[in-house]
Image (cartoon, helix red, strand yellow):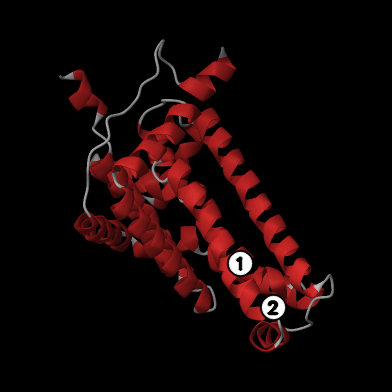
Amino acid sequence: MAHFHVIAGTGDKLDLPIIRSITVADLGDVLRRGAADFWERPSHYAMLAIIYPIIGIVLTVWMNGYHTWPLLYPLIGGFALIGPFAALGLYEISRRRELGLDTSWRHAFGVLKSPAIGAIIAVAAMLLVVFTLWLTAAQALYESLFGAATPQTLGGLMAQIFTEPGGITLLLAGTLLGALFALFTLCTTVIAFPLLLDRDVGAFVAVETSFRAVLKNPLPLLAWGFVVGAGLMLGAALLFVGLAIIIPIFGHATWHLYRKLVEPASAIRGL
């Protein structure tokens, strides 16, 4: 039964949250609230997020040493795929701030004690599979156009893309392929992790609720995905250091997006 609990939650019946309708204008509000959460204790949150620029710099050095520059763009794009899980601690901080509880940075690790940790790990495993498939597909696309040999430097990669036959095809086809992976991630996890922190509904319901949220609010949530993707690209372009601010704000904002999209459990019980 423990396995069933991870998939379907704790109750005898599936707890299917009620989805609200939102507008594109609501995205501005959730971003403002996310920024407010971040600026309440920016030094603490920067400490939490500093791992991202460190990882980015390490990846750049790794690619420079092992000549895997064609994976630079897919790896940067991969932040958008694993971001929903990576921001778990930030959702928890926003949840605690909403309840008027202490928001010291150490509480970000409180998610490890969540009753829904099994379901959280299950959804995270799905994201890891998606991330791996994305890198594999990106590598296969590159090799189909240029073969197994790779450029020795970032400048060599840029020259290959903009001067050699197949370069623009790689850029356009890779962007489209990445967009499809990002769309899948958006549809399945846009609010899955905040929901699991708030209510132990199980992995299936968390993914299903995210999917229903996108179906009911396609334009606002597609716009949200675009904003997040563009923000991550901008943060990475700033030598990855910008991610130390952009990722926490998006993480906090996602909690507030969840609050706008999902009817509270208490309100449902009161019906």
Q: Nearer the viewer, mark 2 or mark 1?
A: 2
Amino acid of disc 2 = Gly
The answer to whether 64 appears left or right of 111 in the picture is right
N-term mark: 2 or 1: 2
Q: Residues within 10 Å of mark 2 (few under 14, many from 20)?
A: some
Amino acid of disc 1 = Gly
The answer to whether 9 appears left or right of 126 in the picture is left
Do the residues under discs 2 and 1 have CB atoms within 8 angstroms?
no
Residue located at (48% from left, 61% from top): 49
For residue 205, what is the image quadrant?
top left
Q: Position of residue 35 (x, y in %)?
A: 29, 62
Q: Nearer the viewer, residue 235 or 171?
A: 171
Q: Secondary structure at mark 1?
A: helix
- Determine whether 89 is above or below 40 in the image: above
Residue located at (47% from left, 67% from top): 232
Residue sitting at the far left: 271
Question: Quarter holding the N terminus?
Answer: top right
Residue located at (37% from left, 55% from top): 222
Q: Position of residue 6 (x, y in %)?
A: 53, 24
The circle drawn on residue 53 is none
For residue 144, what is the image quadrant?
bottom right
- Determine whether 270 is above or below 243 in the image: above
Q: Which residue is mark 2?
A: 166
Q: Secondary structure at mark 2?
A: loop
Residue located at (29% from left, 54% from top): 220
Q: Position of residue 14 (x, y in %)?
A: 40, 18
Q: Give how far apart the Cα atoms at labels 2 and 1 are.
A: 11 Å
Q: Residues within 10 Å of mark 1 (few under 14, many from 20)?
A: many
Question: Quarter holding the C terminus?
Answer: top left
The circle drawn on residue 174 is 1
For residue 249, what is the image quadrant?
bottom left
Query: Could you tell me if residue 6 is visible in this image?
Result: yes
